[in-house]
Image: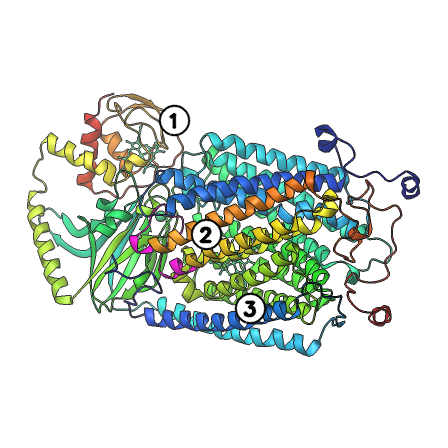
């Protein structure tokens, strides 16, 4: 098959037009783009809900909505952002588009299965949309017995999340097999780009953890529909059991979100500082270590929910062990910058912002991991601040970085650098303005998921709302800028960033089968900035 | 409201455990801020120092791929710091969970969307065996619409959870419906109220004054309104209040057992229907909520889950409220939790239901 392709004239993968040609395609690049469109649309919708909440919270008392509407918005915002946007997020979009090319393959191991994953994702999306007539008000965590007694459409939302879980499992399996079986000749494990290591680790978590949340969501549905008692005490069930199940998945899931972001940052930093990545093996293996340890820390979400004190102390200790590989990665990224020649293009700006914000996200995990301190901070705005610094400051910002970094490759167009770099500052400043006040609110005792609050919390909430709208403008114009470039952008060269990974060695946009001839790999992809003879010496 | 506290840093430290928690908190804050300054400082310094300036030519960069010594140092040093933090978190939880032997046990029951407090101070009528205890709930700050936070701030006719300063208090926490979480920031305590379980927390208040109580586990519509205030009093003043309350109960005890007229019962039942949260699950306009509508139910023929039929009468209503799982109405989930009601209250509720027309 390989030589048959090489004989044809190169055709861009974007050549075929029409909705059907997209939906029926098994090309990993096209599937990646389909995910990109759906996940970014989910991001937009979830974002609008967040802005509505922040409008209500700008002042104490109820302004525009009643508490029930607020609760529904809170639930939809969380569920959409988690299940529809950030979990598929980088893995399904850039993982699909970039990973096969980076390992020198023409596609993933199971292209048809890959298309099926996306169809399953659409099915999940559809089921969730069905429930919008009477949307759920449980929060994205679905704690029973509230979730088993409220008269809103909990079933559609949980079933939707359950179906999305399948999509996630299938994608995970596909990537794991692809990395094992489809690497080009000479592409040894230690020559893999770190993005591949990261997606690989995240896929492992997806495959192992997702079934557990799937089962617990199905049990919840069974309880609601048939009155079988699993979690509701009145029926003989145990509500805390659900929390254990849920967090057994949902703690690892935060690493499904962040590992790919760490992978992207490890790609962008060397390219834009013209230096090899520092501590390749440490970064690669700390991804795997984080994936492993993330399975034994779940009960840190349950410190005050009747968990025994002894168990709490053990889980507090285990939680601290996750912080170590996390810190190691940050130090490695910093060392990569050392004596580099740092080019502050948009992808790099976002990557640096990622490091800046992720340090805050990681450090604020520490008081939460200290069990005696978490008793005070649990379920306050401090936790809201913490996970937004990690998830939004981490994953969302790297999603935007990845969009700009791979945009020329994906679309064959250059975006407007001036606008993108300018809007970056809206995002960065808006983000900090939104979430720094939330740490202070949480320390002061302001509980989360509140439609209203005491007047003394008002000034900080107002600042947070102003920040949120700044952030909203930043994201909106940033995405608009990218879309405009589809029509107005300059044609992109094959390798505008002078990067070494394989996707930059082929056309922009790539041909249908990526490579005219499968390359043979002779070195790792991070040899930047030094002379030829040095390069050889380092191998 | 700044008489409660300015929400800038930690709330006032008003319990004997608070200083232990605060020490751990400030320790991690100081370490984090130092780490923040150092690491972000390095980041910013590198970016400024090594950035490519305008029109700068390509520069030779060193081929640094790893440095084992450095990597070992930056693994071990953070690990040691984390170990210290873990230890102080451990010390703080030991203090928070070190339940004293000699403490007053007060029962707290959470329900949508208020807290009930049951003191162990009771009066008893030897002859009839009836017993009344001091109790109260935060329901009156839970408005029709809105969240109650505003009223909490305005200090309008609200129930205060009174406790004496300097005495060990253990709260035994339960829930009637869904999970709630009792949070008193000034005491640095928080514990979930889980239906079907009894959880507990303890504190010894060290400062006089009023401090907010919140619910921190999302529990539905008025979660944000499930708030109240604890009032820490001088022990002497507390004893006076307690005696006055007991005296009122003694008066009330006398009237119990006397036959009440129907109108009083209905009025009492109407109040209880909302106060006890029945309205969260039962509509009165023929509308289905979690449970069946209750208007016009009296005297009706009803089919149960097991196919049996019955006519709704006093005994059935009483049983439905006291033992909801005994008989399940056909077409509904067995989702009614056991209700926290006294015999008298059931009587009033039944009278109220009896009075409802279709
Ligand atoms: C240094 C590493 C980290 C530590 C020590 C840490 C610790 C914790 C702890 C103890 C909690 C529970 C707090 C509570 O509910 O009382 C928590 C919550 C959370 N963390 Fe982290 N965390 C770390 C990194 C991350 C990362 C990287 C992410 C995401 C990418 C993340 C996402 C979350 C989320 C989503 C929650 C709250 C979920 C909810 O309640 O809705 N954390 N973290
Ligand atoms: Cu976690
Ligand atoms: Cu609540």
Report, in whole angstroms, how far the alpha carbon at label 1 lies from the one at label 3: 64 Å
Location of the N terminus of chain B (image quadrant)? bottom left
* Residue at horizontal 32 percent and vertical 45 percent from the top: B176
- What range is drawn magenta here? A439-457
Left/right placement of residue B29 relative to residue B174 reads right
Point out which mark residue B40 bears: 3
Residue B78 quadrant? bottom right
Other residues around mark 3 within 10 Å, as few (<14) / some (14–19) / many (≥20): some
* Disc 2 target residue: A467
Residue A88: give x, y in percent of width and height: 62, 45
Point out which mark residue A491 bears: none
Q: Disc 2 or disc 1, which is closer to the eye?
A: 2
Residue B220: give x, y in percent of width and height: 37, 42
Subunit that carries the residue with mark 2: A
Residue B95: give x, y in percent of width and height: 36, 70
Report, in whole angstroms, how far the alpha carbon at label 2 lies from the one at label 1: 52 Å
* Disc 1 target residue: B330
Other residues around mark 1 within 10 Å, as few (<14) / some (14–19) / many (≥20): some
């Amino acid at each position: 098959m390989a030589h048959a392709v090489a004989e044809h004239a190169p055709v861009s993968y974007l050549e075929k037009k029409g909705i059907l040609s997209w939906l029926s395609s098994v090309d990993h690049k096209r599937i990646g783009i389909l995910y990109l469109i759906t996940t970014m649309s989910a991001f937009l919708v979830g974002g609008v809900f967040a802005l509505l909440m922040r409008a209500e919270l700008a002042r104490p008392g109820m302004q525009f909505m009643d508490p029930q509407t607020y609760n529904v918005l809170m639930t939809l915002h969380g569920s959409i952002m988690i299940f529809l946007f950030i979990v598929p997020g980088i893995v399904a979009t850039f993982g699909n588009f970039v990973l096969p090319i980076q390992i020198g393959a023409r596609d993933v191991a199971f292209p048809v299965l890959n298309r099926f994953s996306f169809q399953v994702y659409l099915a999940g999306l559809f089921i969730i949309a069905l429930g919008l007539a009477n949307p759920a008000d449980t929060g994205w965590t679905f704690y029973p017995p509230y979730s088993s007694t409220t008269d809103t459409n909990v079933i559609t939302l949980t079933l939707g999340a359950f179906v999305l879980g399948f999509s996630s499992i299938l994608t995970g399996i596909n990537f794991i097999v692809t990395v094992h079986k489809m690497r080009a000749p000479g592409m040894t494990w230690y020559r893999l780009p770190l993005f591949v290591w990261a997606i690989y680790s995240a896929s492992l978590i997806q495959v192992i953890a997702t079934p557990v949340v799937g089962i617990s969501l199905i049990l919840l549905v069974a309880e609601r529909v048939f009155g079988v008692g699993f979690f509701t005490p009145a029926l003989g069930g145990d509500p805390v059991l659900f929390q254990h199940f849920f967090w057994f998945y949902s703690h690892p899931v935060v690493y499904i979100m962040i590992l790919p972001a760490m992978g992207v940052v490890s790609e962008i930093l060397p390219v834009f500082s013209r230096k090899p990545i520092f501590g390749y093996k440490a970064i690669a293996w700390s991804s795997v270590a984080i994936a492993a340890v993330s399975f034994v820390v779940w009960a840190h979400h349950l410190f005050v929910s009747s968990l025994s004190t002894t168990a709490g102390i053990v889980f507090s200790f285990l939680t601290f062990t996750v912080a170590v590989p996390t810190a190691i990665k940050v130090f490695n990224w910093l060392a990569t910058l050392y004596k580099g020649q740092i080019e502050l293009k948009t992808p790099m700006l976002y990557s640096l912002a990622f490091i800046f914000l992720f340090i805050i996200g990681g450090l604020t995990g520490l008081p939460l991991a200290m069990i005696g301190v978490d008793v005070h901070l649990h379920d306050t705005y401090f936790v809201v601040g913490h996970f937004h610094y990690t998830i939004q400051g981490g994953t969302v910002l790297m999603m935007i970085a990845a969009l700009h970094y791979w945009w020329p490759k994906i679309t064959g167009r250059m975006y407007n650098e001036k606008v993108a770099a300018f809007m970056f500052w809206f995002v960065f400043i808006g983000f900090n303005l939104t979430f720094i006040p939330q740490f202070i609110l949480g320390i002061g005792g302001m509980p989360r998921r509140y439609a209203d609050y005491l007047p003394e919390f008002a000034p900080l909430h107002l600042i947070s709302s102003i920040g949120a709208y700044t952030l909203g403008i930043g994201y909106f114009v940033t995405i608009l800028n990218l879309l405009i470039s589809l029509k107005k952008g300059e044609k992109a060269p094959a390798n505008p960033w002078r990067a070494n990974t394989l996707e930059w060695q082929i056309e922009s946009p790539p041909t249908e089968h990526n490579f005219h001839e499968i390359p043979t790999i002779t070195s790792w992809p991070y040899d930047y900035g030094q002379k030829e003879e040095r390069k050889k010496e380092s191998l | 409201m700044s008489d409660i506290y300015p929400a800038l840093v930690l709330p006032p430290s008003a319990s004997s455990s608070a200083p232990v928690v605060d020490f751990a908190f400030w320790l991690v804050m100081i370490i984090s801020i130092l780490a923040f300054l150092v690491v972000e400082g390095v980041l910013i310094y590198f970016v400024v120092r090594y950035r490519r300036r305008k029109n700068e030519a390509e520069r030779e960069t060193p081929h640094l791929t790893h440095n084992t010594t450095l990597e070992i140092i930056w693994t071990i040093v953070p690990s040691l710091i984390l170990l210290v933090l873990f230890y102080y978190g451990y010390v703080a939880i030991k203090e928070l969970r070190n339940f004293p032997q000699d403490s007053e046990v007060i029962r707290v029951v959470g329900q949508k969307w208020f807290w009930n407090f049951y003191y162990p101070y009771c009066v008893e009528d030897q002859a009839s065996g009836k017993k009344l205890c001091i109790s109260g709930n935060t329901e009156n700050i839970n408005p029709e619409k809105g969240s109650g936070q505003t009223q909490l701030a305005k200090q309008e006719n609200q129930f205060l959870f009174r406790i004496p300063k300097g005495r060990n208090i253990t709260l035994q926490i339960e829930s009637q419906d869904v999970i709630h979480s009792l949070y008193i920031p000034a005491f640095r305590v928080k514990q979930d109220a889980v239906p079907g379980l009894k959880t507990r927390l303890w504190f010894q208040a060290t400062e006089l004054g009023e401090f907010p109580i919140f619910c921190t586990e999302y529990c539905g519509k008025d979660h944000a309104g499930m708030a109240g205030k604890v009032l820490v009093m001088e022990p002497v003043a507390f004893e006076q209040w307690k005696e006055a309350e007991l005296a009122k109960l003694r008066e009330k005890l006398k009237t119990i057992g006397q036959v009440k007229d129907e109108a009083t019962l209905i009025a009492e039942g109407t109040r209880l229907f909302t106060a006890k949260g029945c309205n969260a699950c039962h509509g009165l306009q023929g509308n289905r909520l979690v449970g069946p509508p209750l208007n016009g139910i009296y005297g009706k023929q009803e089919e149960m889950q097991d196919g049996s039929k019955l006519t709704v009468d006093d005994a059935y209503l009483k049983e439905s409220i006291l033992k909801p799982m005994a008989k399940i109405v056909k077409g509904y989930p067995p989702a009614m939790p056991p209700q926290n009601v006294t015999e008298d209250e059931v009587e009033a509720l039944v009278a109220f239901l009896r009075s409802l027309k279709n």
